[in-house]
Image (cartoon, rainbow, N blue to C red):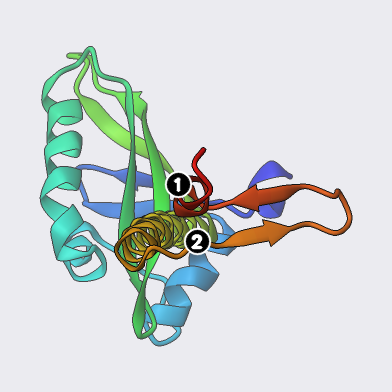
């Protein structure tokens, strides 16, 4: 029941045939969308679906797991080609079955769509950077205003009617001998 209700793309891969031997419906639907209604998938197609900047790291992690029998799993965030764009996914891979020498024979994989989280995180970083840039511009304009008031020997003040607070500029204090 979990395999049919989870949003994760689940699969079991056989390393000898280099093909998936089982996939859940979510996996089938995802790959049918990008493979013209075919969910058949073999390892030779991975490079075509994986973003070029992510592919070498994925192969490195998988290779380490296949060589080192003490590594049972890894996780990796990467981009997969989906229709006409790239979709961020988080991949979890575990050794599902080993041979008598301990070498992996089958892998259990789970892919989770993290595209929205990545985009939200990127939007947050961009907004934070913009706010920092605006803060710096404001700070510089305050310095410019202070310098202009000093050179022109004029001051300014602000009165908050609600609180009754009055604030004078530095030059207004200087003009009034404070």
Residue 76 vs residue 157, the one in the foreground: 157
The residue sitting at 18% across, 35% down in the picture is 61
- Measured as percent of width and height from the top left, residue 157 is found at 62, 59
Q: Quadrant of the N terminus?
A: top right
117 lies left or right of 17: right
Residue 113 vs residue 99, the one in the foreground: 113
67 lies left or right of 78: left
Residue 72 vs residue 152, the one in the foreground: 152
Depicted 35 relative to depicted 145: above or below: below
- Classify mark 2: residues with Cα within 10 Å, few (<14), some (14-19) or many (20+): some
Depicted 125 relative to depicted 52: above or below: above
Provide the residue designation for mark 1. Answer: 174
- Measured as percent of width and height from the top left, residue 33 is found at 47, 80
Which residue occupies the extreme front position in the image? 177
Provide the residue designation for mark 2. Answer: 155
- Measured as percent of width and height from the top left, residue 78 is found at 31, 53
- Measured as percent of width and height from the top left, residue 3 is found at 64, 47
SS of the residue under disc 1: helix
**Residue 156 location, quadrant:** bottom right
30 lies left or right of 84: right
SS of the residue under disc 2: loop
Q: Which mark is residue 58?
A: none
- Which of the two discs, 2 and 1, labels the residue nearer the N terminus? 2
Q: What distance separates the C-alpha of mark 2 from that of mark 1?
A: 9 Å
Proximity of marks 2 and 1: CB atoms separated by less than 8 Å? yes
């Amino acid at each position: 029941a979990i395999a049919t209700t989870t949003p994760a793309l689940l699969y079991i891969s056989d390393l000898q045939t280099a093909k998936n031997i089982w996939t859940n419906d979510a996996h089938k639907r995802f790959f049918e969308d990008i493979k013209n209604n075919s969910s058949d998938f073999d390892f030779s197609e991975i490079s075509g679906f994986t973003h070029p900047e992510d592919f070498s790291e994925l192969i490195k992690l998988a290779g380490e797991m296949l060589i080192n029998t003490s590594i049972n799993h890894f996780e990796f965030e990467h981009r997969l080609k989906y229709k006409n764009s790239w979709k961020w996914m988080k991949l979890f891979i575990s050794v599902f079955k080993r041979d008598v020498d301990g070498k992996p024979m089958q892998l259990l994989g789970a892919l989770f769509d993290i595209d929205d989280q990545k985009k939200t995180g990127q939007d947050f970083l961009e907004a934070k950077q913009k706010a920092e840039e605006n803060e710096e511009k404001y700070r510089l304009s305050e310095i410019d205003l202070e310098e202009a008031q000093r050179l022109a020997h004029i001051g300014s003040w602000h009165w908050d009617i609600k609180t009754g607070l009055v604030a004078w500029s530095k030059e207004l204090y200087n003009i009034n001998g404070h």
